[in-house]
Image (tube, rainbow, N blue to C red):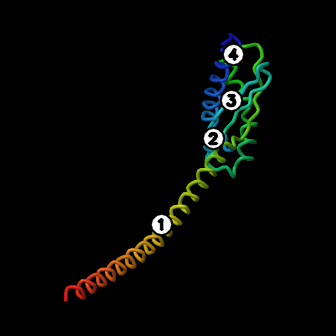
Amino acid sequence: MSRHEIKLKRLIQTYRQTVSEAIVTALDDERLKNLFITVTDVEIDNEMTKAAVYFTLLDSQKKNKAIKALYSARQFILSSLRKKIKIKFLPPIVFIFDERESKANELCDRIDLLAAEYKKKRTGCNETSDSRNSETENSETKNSESDTEKQTAAHGQTGE
């Protein structure tokens, strides 16, 4: 790993930690209260010209409200970053709502639904196959009983 990659990785970690702390500290801002913002990822391009801060919310319906609140708190967040990071040029922040988590949750919900449907169908099939098996066993038993009766009758006729 090159020195630039190490520096970039450290910068990303510092951005993630500092932005998260700044959001918690900036919760005095009425627009950020009760939004439960979580920083999920930070990406900084190799030229260090842009920092994308990905975040999620407890209530994804308030996405636009959260983006506006974060942009209004951006100067506070950047000042917090300047205190911790000593570089000439601090990459500006772009806030992006992280849809990966909500899509993953939707996918998990779909999988759970499909699993429940499959289980329901399978249980229904088992009951049907169980009744089919019972019918088959009953007919086999009847056939076996009639074969036994025939054999008994045949023995009875020859034994007389």
Decide: few, some or many residues near mark 4? Use Cα within 10 Å; few <14, some 14-19, many ≥20: few
21 relative to 49, above or below? below
Decide: few, some or many residues near mark 1? Use Cα within 10 Å; few <14, some 14-19, many ≥20: few
Decide: few, some or many residues near mark 3? Use Cα within 10 Å; few <14, some 14-19, many ≥20: many
**Residue at point 71% right, 13% down?**
4
Q: Are marks 3 and 2 in contact (CB under 8 Å)?
A: no
Circle number at residue 123: 1
Q: Residue lying farthest left? A: 160
Identify the secondary structure beneath mark 1.
helix
Circle number at residue 37: 2
**Residue at point 35% right, 81% down?**
142
Mark 2 vs mark 1: in front: 1
Identify the secondary structure beneath mark 3.
strand
Residue 92 image offset from top left, x and y in percent:
77, 26
Q: Amino acid at mark 2?
A: Ile
- The residue beneath circle 3 is 42
Which of the two discs, 1 and 3, labels the residue nearer the N terminus?
Answer: 3
Depth check, front residue: 28 or 150: 150
